[in-house]
Image: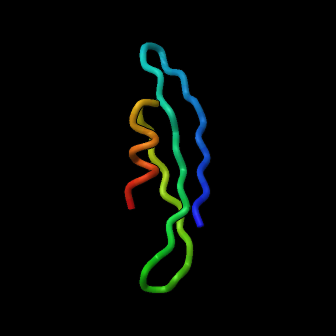
Amino acid sequence: MAKKTVASLQTSSKRLTKAIKMVRSPKTGAYTFQESVMSPEVVNDWLKKN
């Protein structure tokens, strides 16, 4: 089960995107959220990797 949220952020000279994905912990089975701010071109690659 995966959930993704993508929000666009605009700074003075760069366009950035904040991506949030839900990841299941192998130890406990609980879900945690990972957040990262990156350029829009690399969001799909970041969401696909474990």
Q: Which residue lies at the image location 49% right of the left edge and 85% below the top edge?
A: 28
Q: Work out whether residue 43 or residue 30 is closer to the camera in this orientation and state it.
A: 43
Q: Which residue lies at the image location 61% right of the left edge and 57% below the top edge?
A: 3
Which quadrant is the N terminus positioned in?
bottom right
- Relative to 29, residue 22 above or below: above
**Is 30 placed left or right of 13 in the picture?**
right
Circle count: 0
Residue 47, image x, y percentages: 46, 50
Residue 29, image x, y percentages: 52, 82
Residue 26, image x, y percentages: 43, 80
Residue 34, image x, y percentages: 48, 57
Q: Which residue lies at the image location 45% right of the left edge and 40% below the top edge?
A: 43
**Is 5 placed left or right of 41 in the picture?**
right
Q: Work out whether residue 19 or residue 11 is closer to the camera in this orientation and state it.
A: 19
* Direction top: furthest residue: 13
- Relative to 18, residue 48 above or below: below
Q: Which residue lies at the image location 50% right of the left edge and 66% below the top edge?
A: 23
Which quadrant is the C terminus positioned in?
bottom left
- Relative to 6, residue 31 above or below: below
